[in-house]
């Protein structure tokens, strides 16, 4: 049981340290919406999502008021649409119509985002997978709340390099079609290796086929809380440092457990997982980079950064798993550039490059996230960046991801403003040497030898 005392204990965290429940995400299976007729499929999708989530926003508002805990976003994730639309979508435009249906129902029920315009192609692509992937630029340009993700590799399957090459082109096309909004469409598109089935965070959320018909996943975030706790043990040894992070993560996760259980009870939907991820915001003091500085770095990106991030990520997970019956999703430390003021400052000071961020992704929660790059970066170079990150995930048996934004019409040294939780970002340089011959080889990079564990 979670006591009222534990809720009261969070008041100062909420008021002074930017603690929030980042999202309540309702995952919904759309497998029973599959239909050979496109219009019938769209109607079934609209009706099921509307019926399942009609009280989600209202419930979130009640919990916020009752417990005084901010819930920043209410979201929906659905079965990967490549699976749902395979029977009725004969063209990419057919898939775009489903995306528009998802956007309509998201607006109707009042959620911030809806994820699951997705395909899982780590070993190969079906015709439906390819049609959906090719539809992504138009789908994201013609919708407001739909988010898209594609899983391109896994430790068990290797990396689908045909899909990696295609996704470089898709990212570039998405940037072009949304260039009037500084290529904002790319902020709603992420590619994965080893994507989890129960991720509540956008843009990568989808409802995995191993999940129940509907489930509630909660994402909790508290970089400011961790940083404040570490200020009190400044100069202490690593044992004290680790214990402080673990205890703080425990408290933050208990808040998520409370919200998840209450939402589950009120909505009549089973509780899935709490995802304890230190996901920063542009707010001053709500920064993972600032935690790294509190651990002892002058700037994120300095020598020792990867070690400090590894320590942070591990202790957050250790504290979280003791606080909730089910911890899942991504759980750990996010390092998105545009959403973290400390990361932005590190880039502007010359302390942080894409190459250093790539090294950090070996030990963080996800990967290269919300990084603005020059608009003239080639699709092949974007595919190369994706391939590098997929390899890190495959070899290390961890989730990795890429969400880069080639901002059309802007170059290194300029800034781009996304607004809200997406923040702003300096345009970061990309290595100018070509990898085109590499990404154009085609086929699949095999799974590593340690994947054979049967």
Image (spheres, helix red, strand yellow):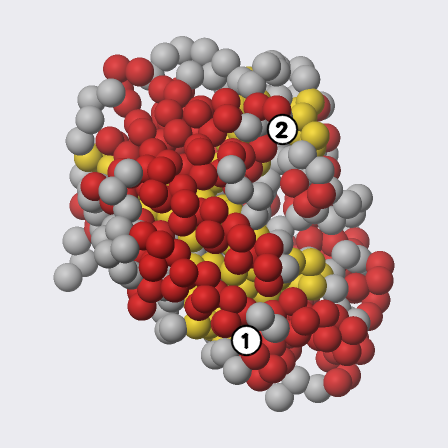
What percent of the width, then of the height, locates residue 357?
53, 33
Which residue: 15% across, 61% down? 454
Would you say 87 lies left or right of 257 here? left
Q: Quadrant of the N terminus?
A: bottom right
- The earlier-in-sequence mark between 2 and 1 is 2
Query: Could you tell me if the residues under marks 2 and 1 are in contact, i.e. CB atoms within 8 Å?
Result: no
The quadrant holding residue 161 is top left
Which residue: 37% across, 73% down? 212
What percent of the width, then of the height, locates residue 290?
72, 43
Which numbered marker is on residue 188? Answer: none
Q: Is residue 153 above or below residue 179?
A: below
How many numbered badges does the structure rendering display?
2
State the residue in front, 88 or 320. Answer: 88
- Residue bearing the label numbered 1: 324
Helix, strand or loop at disc 1? loop
- Residue located farthest toward the top when viewing the structure as drawn: 433
Dot 2 surroundings within 10 Å: few (below 14), some, or many (20 or more)? Answer: some
Q: CA distance from mark 2 to mark 1?
A: 40 Å
Dot 1 surroundings within 10 Å: few (below 14), some, or many (20 or more)? Answer: many
State the residue in front, 23 or 153. Answer: 23
Q: Is residue 220 above or below residue 367?
A: below
Q: Can residue 278 be seen from the camera position used here?
A: no
What percent of the width, then of the height, locates residue 121?
27, 44
Which residue: 20% across, 44% down? 126
Which residue: 39% across, 64% down? 44
The quadrant holding residue 74 is bottom right
What percent of the width, then of the height, locates residue 340?
68, 40
- Residue bearing the label numbered 2: 181
Would you say 212 lies left or right of 188 here? left
Q: Is residue 133 above or below residue 85?
A: above
Helix, strand or loop at disc 2? helix
Q: Can residue 14 be seen from the camera position used here?
A: yes
């Amino acid at each position: 049981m979670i006591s009222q005392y534990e809720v009261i204990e969070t008041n100062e965290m909420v008021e002074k340290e930017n603690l929030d429940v980042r999202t309540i995400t309702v995952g919904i299976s759309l497998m029973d919406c599959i239909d050979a007729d496109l219009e019938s499929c769209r109607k079934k999708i609209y009706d099921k999502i509307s019926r399942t989530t009609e009280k989600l926003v209202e419930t979130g508002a009640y919990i916020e008021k009752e417990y005084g805990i901010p819930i920043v976003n209410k979201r929906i994730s659905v079965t990967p649409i490549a699976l749902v639309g395979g029977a009725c979508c004969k063209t990419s435009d057919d898939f775009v119509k489903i995306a528009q249906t998802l956007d309509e129902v998201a607006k109707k029920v009042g959620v911030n985002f809806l994820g699951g315009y997705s395909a899982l192609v780590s070993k190969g692509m079906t015709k439906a997978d390819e049609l959906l992937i090719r539809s992504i630029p138009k789908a994201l340009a013609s919708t407001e709340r739909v988010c898209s993700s594609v899983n391109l590799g896994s430790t068990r399957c290797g990396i689908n390099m045909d899909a990696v090459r295609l996704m470089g082109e898709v990212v570039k096309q998405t940037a072009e079609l949304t260039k009037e909004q500084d290529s904002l469409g790319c902020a709603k598109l992420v590619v994965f290796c080893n994507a989890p089935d129960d991720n509540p965070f956008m843009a990568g959320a989808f409802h995995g086929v191993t999940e129940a018909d509907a489930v509630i996943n909660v994402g909790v975030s508290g970089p400011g809380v961790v940083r404040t706790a570490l200020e009190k043990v400044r100069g202490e040894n690593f044992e004290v440092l680790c214990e402080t992070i673990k205890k703080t993560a425990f408290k933050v996760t208990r808040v998520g457990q409370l919200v998840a259980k209450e939402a589950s009870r009120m909505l009549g939907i089973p509780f899935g997982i709490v995802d304890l991820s230190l996901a920063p915001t542009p707010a001053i003091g709500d920064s993972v980079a600032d935690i790294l500085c509190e651990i002892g770095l002058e700037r994120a990106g300095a020598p020792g950064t990867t070690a400090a991030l590894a320590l942070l990520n591990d202790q957050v997970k250790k504290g979280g798993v003791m606080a909730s019956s089910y911890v899942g999703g991504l759980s750990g430390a996010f390092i998105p550039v545009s959403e973290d003021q400390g990361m932005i400052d590190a880039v502007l000071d010359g302390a942080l490059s894409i190459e250093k961020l790539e090294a950090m992704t070996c030990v963080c929660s996800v990967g290269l996230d919300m990084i603005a790059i020059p608009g003239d970066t080639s699709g092949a170079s974007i595919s190369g960046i994706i391939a590098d990150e997929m390899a890190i995930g495959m070899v290390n048996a961890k989730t990795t991801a890429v969400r880069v934004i080639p901002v059309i019409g802007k170059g290194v040294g300029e800034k781009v403003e996304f607004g809200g939780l997406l923040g702003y970002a300096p345009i970061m340089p990309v290595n100018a040497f070509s990898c085109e011959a590499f990404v154009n080889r085609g086929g699949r990079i095999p799974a590593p030898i340690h994947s054979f564990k049967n």
